[in-house]
Amino acid sequence: MGSVNGHGKQPLFSFGLISDVQYADILDGRSFLGVPRYYRHSILVLQRAVKEWNNHQKHKFVINFGDIVDGYCPKDQSLNTVKKIVNEFEMFNGPVHHLIGNHCLYNLPRSELLPLFKIKSLQGHAYYDFSPVSDYRFVVLDGYDISAIGWPQDHPRTLEALKFLREKNPNEDKNNPTGLIGLERRFLMFNGGIGKEQMEWFNGVLQDATKLKQKVVVCCHLPLHPGASSKEALLWNYEEVMNLIHRFNCVKVCISGHDHKGGYYIDSHGVHHRVLEAALECPPGTNAFGYADVYDDRISLYGTDRMRSTHIYFDPNADF
Ligand SMILES: [Zn+2]
């Protein structure tokens, strides 16, 4: 039998991925732009994803790219609903790495959310890294590090975010982009930024990965490049993060959620950006989840239905 991928060799490892489940036990609705949202169906998408991942038997781990419960979930049901979705993820026969999203933070503060996600953190931060094989490093960034949601109201990071939004967005409703031009349209309350300490930590991880000749996959709920995302969904300081990434050659791919329609772009430095299609927006009976086969020279993402497949070939001229 030939190899199913036509590439003639086995992947180093594979992993499952899904984004923006945004489950809630409420009637279907629509986004601000009128896109249908199937709040009760999305848990079925997740259940089918876990079943497929388990059937595959070889996935080393799964990554949840954030927003597991919708902000419209009645607040008296938030804790139980988050637990319910986390339990569905835990039906996967292996580790699950969770990213936090704005909708998670509308439901629960960081202090409650992070233990449920089993994110080990000293001061409520949700950034971490892991190395599934010696040649690869995954970095999970916390895009709501500087944010007006999730931290206590008087927390320095909430105050910093509110000050930033007051300076950048003149609208009373800080989720309203009216009057903001071009890339300024990202200065919205449902987005966030990466703070100084996290940038320093990220810099250290990229230095270490370079030393170890590891290829890096960066995961962040918020997209990091306008080529792959709506302007309104971008991380506030994506340019700062990309400038850091571009000082190294180790980062091959940045994977995000949050911008439900999905996207793909290769930037001027050859870094690939893949924004995943949301599970929430699958019409009943359809899916949006996938898995990735990881090789030394490429990552092949195989999506179901709404999630597009993407074959990411690394630049052979990169300094490796
Ligand atoms: Zn989001």
Image (cartoon, rainbow, N blue to C red):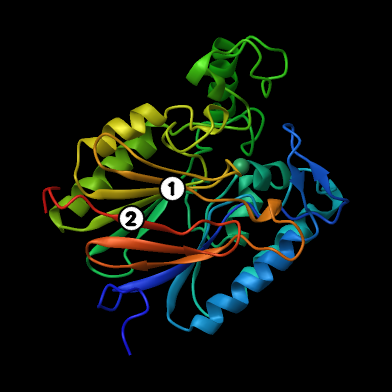
Q: Are marks 1 and 2 in contact (CB under 8 Å)?
A: yes
Query: Residue, x 74% and y 66% (percent of image)?
Result: 285
Numbered badge on residue 312: 2
Quadrant position of the N terminus in the picture: bottom left
Q: Position of residue 19 (x, y in %)?
A: 58, 54
| Residue 14 visible in the picture | yes
**Which residue appears at 29% of the width and 78% of the height?**
10
Q: Is residue 200 above or below residue 282?
A: above
Front residue (pair 88, 298) = 298
Instruction: Determine the quadrant in which ligand 1 lies.
Output: top right
Residue 293: where, in percent of width, then height?
Answer: 37, 69
What is the C-alpha distance between the residues marked 1 and 2?
9 Å
Q: Residues within 10 Å of mark 2 (few under 14, many from 20)?
A: many
Near-viewer residue (214 or 11): 11
- Where is 168 relative to 50, above or below? above
Left or right position of 35 against 170: right
Instruction: Quadrant for residue 165, please give it.
Output: top right
Lower position in the chain sequence, tag 1 or tag 2:
1
Image location of residue 21, percent across then percent down: 66, 56
